[in-house]
C-alpha cells in the first residue's frame, strides 16, 4: 500500500484566482456531503477496516511521509518558526508509529453511532429511545501538528461524519501524505475517499470560505492559538466547538509532598512544551514556598526551563526573570514558565479564575479538603489532583484520540472524541397510537 501524494497541493500562499478557490472549496463541500450520506450506511466493520488499513499504509509509507515532512520543516525554518513550533511540526519513525497505533486504537473503540443513550415506555405504549447519530460534515481547522490530520480524520470517520481538514500551512505536505494513507484505508473498506478531505492550499482565504459553507458543513472545530480561535468565532456562520488556548496551571499547596510536587511540575511543563496541556503558570502556596519552590525551580532550570516570577518567587530563586502582567496570560508553548506565590488554595482559584482559559489545571496536595475545593471550584474543562496537566489528552482518557480540548460549555467539553462528535435523535415505536 504505497502512496504517490495523490492529494494535489497548491504551494503558494495566495491563490491566483479567488473564483477558482471558491470552486475548489464548494467541490470539497459537495463531496463531503455525499460522503456523509454514504457513511450513515457504513457498518462498524467497514469503518474499523478503513482505520486498520490506514495504519498499515502509514507504516508502509514512513519514508514518503518523512520526505514530505522534511519539505514542511524546511518551509517552517525559512519562515523563522521557533524551535518549539518546529518540534510540533516534526515527524520521525517513532511519532509515525504513534500515529499508526492511534488509528488502531480508534478502531478498537466502541462505535458510538446507533448507541442507545436512554429508552423508556410511555403510559400510552409508545417506546421512545434516544440514539446517537453522526453530526454529518465536520470542518476542522488546526495549526502546525500533522499528527492531528490522522487523529481528526480517524475520529470523524469512526463517529460516522465526513471531515474537511484545513491544517496549518507549515504542515501541508505532511498532512497530504497522511491523508493519502487514510484514502488507501477508505478504499480498502469500500468507502468513498471523500470521507476525509484536505483543503489543498496554503491560502488563508480558504479558511474564510470554509467558515461560510453552512450548506455543506454542520460543525466547525478550530484547534490552535488565540488569534485562530477568535477569527473562527467571529467569522463562522456554522456552529463552533471551540478549543481555546491552553493557559494551564499547576498549584502546589502547602500540604504537597515535595518530591511529588517537583516531579509533577517538571513533567507538566517540560515533557513536551509545545502541547496545549503543557503548564504555563506555576502557583505556589506562600506559606510553604520557602520549603517547596527552590527545589522545584532547580529541577526546572536543570531541565532547561526559563522562569519568570513575581517578587515573592524571585526572592526565593535568585536569577529568576521578572514576570510582567502579560506573563499570566501567555501560552508560551516553549520552555518558559511563569511563577507566582498565592495565599493558599483560595488564592490559586482566584488567579486561575482571573487569568485561566478554562482548559486544564492541577493541584498538588496531600490535603483532601484542599483538593476537593480546587476540583469543585476551578471551572476548567479538566481539573486534576496530584497529576500532570500533560494528561489532557483523549488517548490518556481512553478515548483512543481526540481532535482537541473543548473549553466551551455547549455540546462538548474537555477531550473531543468519537462520542463527542455525535448528536442524537429520538426514535419512537408505536402500535397504532393516535393523539387524543
Image (tube, grey):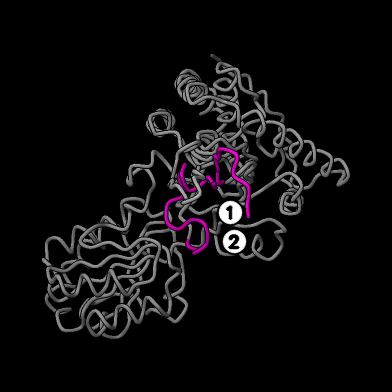
Q: Could you tell me residue 214's position as x and y percent?
A: 74, 51
Query: In the image, 109: left or right of 28?
Result: left
Above-or-below relation of 99 to 386: above
> For the residue carrying disc 2, how many other residues have a C-alpha within 10 Å: few (<14), some (14-19), or many (20+)?
many
Question: Would you say residue 176 sits in the magenta stretch?
Answer: no
Which quarter of the rendering shows the C terminus?
bottom right
Tell me the SS state at disc 1: strand
The answer to whether one can see residue 73 in this image is no
Instruction: Decide which of 326, 239 is in the foreground and name it.
Output: 239
The answer to whether one can see residue 361 in this image is yes
Task: Name which of mark 2 and mark 1 comes first in the sequence.
Answer: 1
State yes or no: discs 2 and 1 in contact (Cβ < 8 Å).
Answer: yes
Above-or-below relation of 87 to 298: above
Query: In the image, 132: left or right of 318?
Result: right
Q: Could you tell me residue 46's position as x and y percent?
A: 52, 21
User: Which residue lies under the disc numbered 1?
Assistant: 222
Tell me the SS state at disc 2: helix
Q: Could you say which disc has been placed on residue 29 in the image?
A: none
Query: In the image, 151: left or right of 234?
Result: left
Instruction: Decide which of 226, 406 is in the foreground and name it.
Output: 406
The quarter of the displayed image where residue 119 is located: top left
Residue in the image at 49% along x and 45% along y? 125
Residue in the image at 53% along x and 45% along y? 422
User: Which residue lies under the disc numbered 2?
Assistant: 229
Residue bounds of the magenta highlight: 407-436
From mark 2 to mark 1, how far is it between C-alphas?
6 Å
Amino acid at each position: 500500500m504505497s502512496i504517490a501524494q495523490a492529494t494535489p497541493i497548491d504551494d503558494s500562499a495566495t491563490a491566483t484566482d479567488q473564483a477558482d478557490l471558491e470552486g475548489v472549496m464548494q467541490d470539497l463541500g459537495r463531496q463531503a456531503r455525499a460522503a456523509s450520506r454514504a457513511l450513515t450506511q457504513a457498518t462498524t466493520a467497514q469503518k474499523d477496516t478503513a482505520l486498520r488499513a490506514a495504519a498499515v499504509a502509514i507504516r508502509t509509507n514512513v519514508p514518503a511521509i518523512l520526505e514530505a515532512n522534511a519539505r514542511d520543516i524546511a518551509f517552517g525554518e525559512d519562515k523563522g518558526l521557533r524551535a518549539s513550533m518546529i518540534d510540533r511540526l516534526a515527524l520521525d519513525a517513532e511519532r509515525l508509529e504513534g500515529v499508526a497505533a492511534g488509528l488502531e486504537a480508534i478502531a478498537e473503540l466502541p462505535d458510538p453511532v446507533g448507541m442507545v443513550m436512554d429508552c423508556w415506555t410511555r403510559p400510552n405504549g409508545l417506546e421512545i429511545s434516544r440514539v446517537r447519530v453522526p453530526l454529518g460534515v465536520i470542518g476542522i481547522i488546526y495549526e502546525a501538528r500533522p499528527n492531528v490530520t490522522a487523529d481528526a480524520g480517524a475520529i470523524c470517520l469512526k463517529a460516522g461524519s465526513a471531515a474537511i481538514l484545513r491544517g496549518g500551512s507549515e504542515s501541508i505536505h505532511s498532512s497530504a501524505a497522511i491523508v493519502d494513507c487514510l484514502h488507501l484505508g477508505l478504499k480498502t473498506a469500500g468507502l468513498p475517499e471523500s470521507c476525509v478531505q484536505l483543503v489543498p492550499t496554503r491560502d488563508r482565504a480558504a479558511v474564510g470560505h470554509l467558515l461560510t459553507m453552512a450548506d455543506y458543513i454542520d460543525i466547525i472545530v478550530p484547534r490552535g492559538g488565540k488569534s485562530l480561535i477568535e477569527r473562527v468565532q467571529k467569522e463562522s456562520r456554522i456552529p463552533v466547538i471551540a478549543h481555546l488556548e491552553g493557559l494551564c496551571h499547576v498549584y502546589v499547596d502547602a500540604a504537597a509532598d515535595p518530591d511529588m510536587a517537583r516531579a509533577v511540575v517538571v513533567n507538566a511543563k517540560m515533557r513536551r512544551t509545545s502541547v496545549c496541556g503543557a503548564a504555563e503558570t506555576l502557583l505556589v502556596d506562600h506559606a510553604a514556598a520557602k520549603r517547596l519552590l527552590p527545589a522545584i525551580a532547580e529541577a526546572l532550570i536543570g531541565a532547561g526551563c526559563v522562569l519568570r516570577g513575581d517578587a515573592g518567587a524571585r526572592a526565593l530563586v535568585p536569577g529568576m526573570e521578572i514576570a510582567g502582567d502579560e506573563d499570566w496570560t501567555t501560552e508560551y508553548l516553549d520552555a518558559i514558565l511563569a511563577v507566582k506565590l498565592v495565599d493558599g488554595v483560595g488564592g490559586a482559584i482566584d488567579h486561575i479564575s482571573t487569568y485561566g482559559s478554562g482548559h486544564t489545571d492541577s493541584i498538588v496536595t496531600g490535603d483532601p479538603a484542599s483538593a476537593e475545593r480546587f476540583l469543585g471550584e476551578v471551572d476548567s474543562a479538566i481539573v486534576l489532583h496530584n497529576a500532570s496537566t500533560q494528561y489532557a489528552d483523549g488517548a490518556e482518557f481512553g478515548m483512543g484520540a481526540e481532535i482537541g480540548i473543548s473549553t466551551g460549555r455547549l455540546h462538548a467539553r474537555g477531550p473531543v472524541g468519537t462520542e463527542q462528535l455525535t448528536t442524537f435523535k429520538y426514535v419512537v415505536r408505536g402500535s397504532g397510537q393516535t393523539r387524543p
